[in-house]
Image: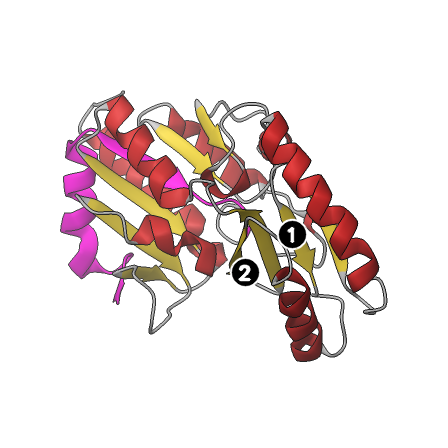
Amino acid sequence: MRYFLSQGCRSIAQRLAAERTLCAFDFDGTLAPIVSHPDRARMLVRTRRLLERLAGVYPCAVISGRARANLVRRLGGVRIAHTIGNHGAETAQPSTASRRLTQSWLLALTPALAPLPGVWIEDKGCSLALHYRQARAKGEARRAILDAVRALKGARTLGGKQVVNVLPASAPGKGAALARLRDRLRCEAVLYVGDDENDEEAFDLEGDVVAVRIGRARNSGARYFLKNQSEIDALLELMVGLRASRGMAE
């Protein structure tokens, strides 16, 4: 992996600024710092301002594991044209079938996980997030969660930072959502920034994709990295500045 903000990668950023590039981001751990509870997640003021400037000069998207309505609220009024929730599955209202399926899982998982201290279930409409960040014995909690999930019908899991996500097996992931959006907008290139296991589908998307991971990871499909989430402002500022220097806007 190469450090994206290094001088050696500047030519890559310059190329993206010269093309019709879709700039897409995860939210938690990427645009906003990871916090102890998802309800506390917020973008910093400077990040919000830079993201708004970026959206004025590039096609932009945020693709999050959050429910789409929750994601839009977290963006704090930033005018992002394309917001996709539930790990790529939700571009509008959750379907009745998806909602019915996740409710059946919720009924099964609630009594199974209730005895586990620090484990709680987040219902996101067409997916569930099984959080164990507050559990003292995190390894034991994760194993118990995975055991419970194996009994569910029609489900697949996505890992995360101290969370197990449960989605319909047929639900599209972030990679499929990103590909559809790229093709619909007729973008030549994609810059995708994420921080977690559930971003790997987007990192692995074929074509002219510059995948940047928050935090270096040996087994990631991303070819580039930022040292930590606090560097997202520097990346946004770089891309805005390069576009402005060319006098270009989308």
Q: Quadrant of residue 115?
A: bottom right
In three-dimensional space, the C-alpha distance between marks 2 and 1, rounded to whole angstroms, equals: 9 Å
Quadrant the C terminus occupies: top left
Magenta range is: 1-28
Residue at disc 2, secondary structure: strand
| Label tally | 2
Q: Is residue 19 above or below residue 248?
A: below
Residue at image coords 58%, 54%: 165
- Residue type, label 1: Ala
22 relative to 159 in the view: left or right: left
Numbered circle sitting on residue 129: 1
Residue at image coords 17%, 28%: 246
Q: Is residue 101 above or below residue 248?
A: below
Q: Position of residue 159 (x, y in %)?
A: 52, 61
Q: Quadrant of residue 8?
A: bottom left
Label 2, residues with CA under 10 Å away: few <14, some 14-19, many ≥20: some
Residue at image coords 42%, 44%: 173
Residue under pointer 2: 160
The residue nearer to you, when weighing 73 against 47, is: 73
Residue 9 is inside the magenta segment = yes
Residue at image coords 17%, 42%: 14
Q: Position of residue 126 (x, y in %)?
A: 60, 37
- Residue type, label 2: Gly
The residue nearer to you, when weighing 164 against 74, is: 164
Q: Quadrant of residue 39?
A: top right
Quadrant the N terminus occupies: bottom left
Residue at disc 1, secondary structure: strand
Kindly indicate whether the residue at mark 1 contacts the one at mark 2 (C-beta within 8 angstroms). yes
The answer to whether one can see residue 74 in this image is no
